């Protein structure tokens, strides 16, 4: 009996030691392999590590990659400062961001004191109002490349945003010990190193990048691009002309054609997204802050192509939902007619030319609202 007890103790001790050692290497492996992930995954991982949200900023900009390539924060700050307007800007764009991610971030990272008296600019688009593959991409990025957070288990509201079934619940819990399992879209397949978070890139020049036959060459290319992002994007206020891996301050105009097969990509409504945008607005107001939903149009061709202006489109239905719940001044629209086709990198992301127009527009909006407050 004593022998059996000692044997059981040794077995448990060995198992615990084995788990501890494997957990250590899993954490180390995860951090090393992230540098070989696709650009969206790498950006999400690095941006999620930011801890400067608690500084005393004047304006907070939250949104997806369209925001990342749509507003130049340094240019905006210069324009505000030139008009003697407070110009400390918190710029927090994440690829494939959805209202669920923004609501989670506000609720877990901001106290009432940090929201009170602050203005939040929230980027909305047809992508964040409809059922499309980018929502699943968002969840994959959040769970696989965001900071592990125990609050997803203890807060039912947050849990319902992401851990919607038992499989996700268990896998996310297990990843606390072994985070490297989150780098596999299928746990049973060690060949799938990274989750599928990259959709077909609408920038046609990159097609060869996705058709690369040598997987090791492809991973090396991803790492090289991520090094560019680390040096030129993450260390320089997070603005990036989407998919352009070169340093160029000029406004380069190109025209990119759409694939007709994508016509119905954003035509299925996702009412849960509308509700979450509403929760974000109410949460900010309840904590003494203010906000603006602002719409950056798709390129002129794609705006027509995806039928974004149709009354039956999910985007227009979502806007109708928001206008019923908030005053009209809470929504800011840029007219599609302001843009030309060559103001965009692809169907969705503005290039530097488009970003300058958007930045100027937002600067004028802030200026006019500031003046209106002063003259009251």
Image (tube, helix red, strand yellow):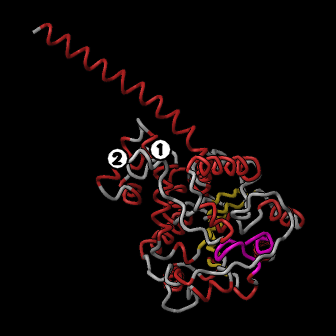
- Indicate yes or no whether the magenta region holds residue 354: yes
Between tags 2 and 1, which lies in front?
Answer: 2
Work out whether 157 lies above or below 204. above
Helix, strand or loop at mark 1: loop
Residue occupied by mark 2:
188
Task: Name the residue rendered at 55%, 60% in the picture.
Answer: 287
**Nearest the eye: 36 or 235:** 36
- Indicate yes or no whether the magenta region holds residue 272: no
Work out whether 137 lies above or below 305. above
The answer to whether residue 327 of the structure is visible from this angle is yes
Residue 77, quarter of picture: bottom right
Determine crowd level at label 1: few under 14, some 14-19, many 20+ residues with C-alpha closer than 10 A: some
Looking at the image, the residue that sits furthest to the right is 82
Task: Name the residue rendered at 36%, 43% in the picture.
Answer: 173
Count of labels in the image:
2
**Nearest the eye: 131 or 186:** 186
Helix, strand or loop at mark 2: loop
What span is in magenta? 342-356
Marks 2 & 1, CB-CB < 8 Å contact: no
Looking at the image, the residue that sits furthest to the front is 213
Position of residue 300 measured from the top left corner of the image (x, y, whole percent): 68, 85
Q: Is residue 83 left or right of residue 342?
A: right
Q: In this view, does 344 lie to the left or right of 247?
A: left
Q: Is residue 73 left or right of residue 172?
A: right
Position of residue 231 measured from the top left corner of the image (x, y, whole percent): 75, 47
Residue occupied by mark 1:
148
């Amino acid at each position: 009996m004593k022998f059996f007890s000692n044997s059981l103790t040794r077995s448990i001790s060995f198992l615990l030691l084995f788990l501890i050692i494997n957990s250590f290497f899993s954490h180390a492996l995860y951090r090393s392999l992230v540098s070989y992930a696709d650009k969206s995954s790498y950006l999400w991982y690095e941006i999620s590590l930011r801890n400067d949200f608690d500084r005393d900023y004047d304006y907070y900009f939250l949104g997806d990659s369209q925001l990342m390539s749509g507003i130049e924060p340094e240019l905006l700050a210069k324009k505000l400062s030139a008009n003697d307007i407070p110009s400390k800007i918190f710029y927090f764009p994440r690829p494939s961001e959805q209202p669920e991610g923004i609501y989670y971030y506000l609720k877990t990272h901001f106290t009432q004191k940090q929201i009170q008296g602050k203005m939040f600019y929230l980027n909305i688009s047809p992508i964040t109002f409809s059922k499309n593959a980018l929502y699943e991409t968002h969840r994959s990025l959040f769970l696989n490349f965001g900071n592990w957070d125990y609050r997803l288990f203890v807060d039912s509201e947050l849990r319902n945003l992401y851990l919607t079934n038992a499989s996700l619940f268990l896998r996310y819990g297990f990843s606390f010990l072994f985070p490297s399992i989150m780098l596999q879209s299928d746990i049973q397949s060690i060949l799938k190193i990274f989750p599928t978070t990259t959709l077909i890139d609408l920038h046609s020049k990159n097609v060869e990048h996705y058709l690369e036959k040598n997987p090791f060459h492809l991973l090396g290319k991803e790492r090289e691009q991520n090094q560019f992002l680390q040096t030129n994007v993450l260390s320089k206020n997070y603005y990036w002309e989407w998919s352009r891996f070169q340093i160029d301050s000029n406004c380069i105009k190109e025209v990119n054609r759409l694939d007709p097969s994508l016509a119905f990509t954003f035509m299925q409504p996702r009412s849960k997204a509308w509700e979450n945008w509403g929760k974000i607005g109410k949460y900010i107001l309840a904590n003494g802050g203010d906000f603006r939903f602002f719409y950056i149009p798709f390129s002129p061709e794609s705006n027509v192509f995806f039928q974004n202006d149709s009354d039956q489109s999910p985007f227009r239905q979502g806007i109708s939902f928001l206008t019923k719940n908030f005053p009209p001044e809470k929504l800011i629209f840029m007219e599609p007619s302001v843009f030309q086709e060559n103001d965009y990198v692809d169907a969705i992301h503005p290039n530097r030319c488009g970003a300058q127009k958007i930045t100027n527009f937002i600067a004028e909006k802030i200026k006019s609202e500031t003046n209106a407050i002063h003259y009251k």
